[in-house]
Amino acid sequence: QVQLQESSPGLVKPSETLSLTCTVSGGSISGSYWSWIRQPPGKGLEWIGYIYFSGNTNYNPSLKGRVTISLDMSKNQFSLKLSSVTAADTAIYYCAKHEGWIDPWGQGTLVTVSS
Amino acid sequence: DFVMTQSPDSLAVSLGERATINCKSSQSVLFTSNNKNYLAWYQQKPGQPPKLLLNWASTRQSGVPDRFSGSGSGTDFTLTISSLQAEDVAVYYCHQYYSPPYTFGQGTKLEIK
């Protein structure tokens, strides 16, 4: 059973870059798509983007080119970078396996953007 | 983008009664070549990540009680809980995986009356 765990940067300053890593256990990154999704406190879900094990990516245009998702096959990890963050980027960030539907999900990590 | 609109935003149902949540997509999520609807339903309890309940609009995941069912095709879908249990209190989301950017409904909060 695949399990995912997000790293926890916690607090990021406005205009800086948010960086998160997701560690996949119980299975290989190879052969699958992997996504990042976020959820502002008390609000709904927003898909950020995915990466295929080959390195191909697809990002949500709503994030206006601020997103980069990469992977490290040797560590069975994939990562998210979101640049030029503002308070609107404060959210719980989830990593997940993306088979079309999204399952399973990591537990999520709250990232707060504040000076 | 596909806009997913759920109704109602919140719902209170008595224990043992039926709960019905609707999801409407701004465009069809039915892929005609395989006759599959690219729609999923999730349940999210407080402090937890979403949990996949159904994919392909009506295929229940392993371990999901059979009181949960999904129906619909094209642009209109329904999640039904046939007999509400206390543990079903949660927010429910629909999700289209037909075309990126993949989008979710705004969520329906289900409570006990």
Image (tube, rainbow, N blue to C red):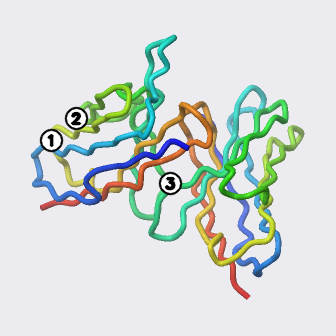
Q: Quadrant of the C terminus of chain A?
A: bottom right
Query: So how many labels did they put on this image?
Result: 3
Which residue matches tag 3?
B49
Viewport quadrant of the N terminus of chain A = top right
Amino acid type at mark 1: Ser
Q: Chain of mark 3?
A: B
Can you tell which mark lies on residue B62? none
Location of mark 2 (residue): B67
For the point 42% across and 46% down, the residue is: B4
User: Which kind of residue does numbered mark 3 sit on?
Assistant: Pro
* Relative side of A50 to B4, left or right: right
Residue B83: which disc? 1
Q: Residue at x 62, y 36 (%)?
A: A98
**Secondary structure found at label 1:** loop
Distance between mark 2 and mark 3 Cα atoms: 21 Å
Q: Residue B33 in the image: x percent, y percent? A: 51, 11
Secondary structure of residue under mark 3: loop
Chain for numbered disc 2: B
Do the residues at discs 1 and 3 belong to one chain? yes
Q: Is residue B89 above or below residue A86?
A: above
Question: Do marks 2 and 3 share a subunit?
Answer: yes
Residue B40: % across, % down: 44, 36
Calculate the distance from the C-alpha at mark 2 to the C-alpha at mark 1: 6 Å
Q: Residues within 10 Å of mark 1 (few under 14, many from 20)?
A: some
| Circle 2/circle 1 CB separation < 8 Å | yes
* Tag 2 secondary structure: loop
Q: Kindly identify the amino acid type of the residue bearing the numbered disc 2.
A: Arg
Q: CA distance from mark 1 to mark 3?
A: 24 Å
Whole-percent x, y for residue B85 in the image: 19, 49
Q: Please report the residue visible at 37 percent of the width from the left and 33 percent of the height from the top.
A: B75
A88 or B42, which is in the foreground? A88
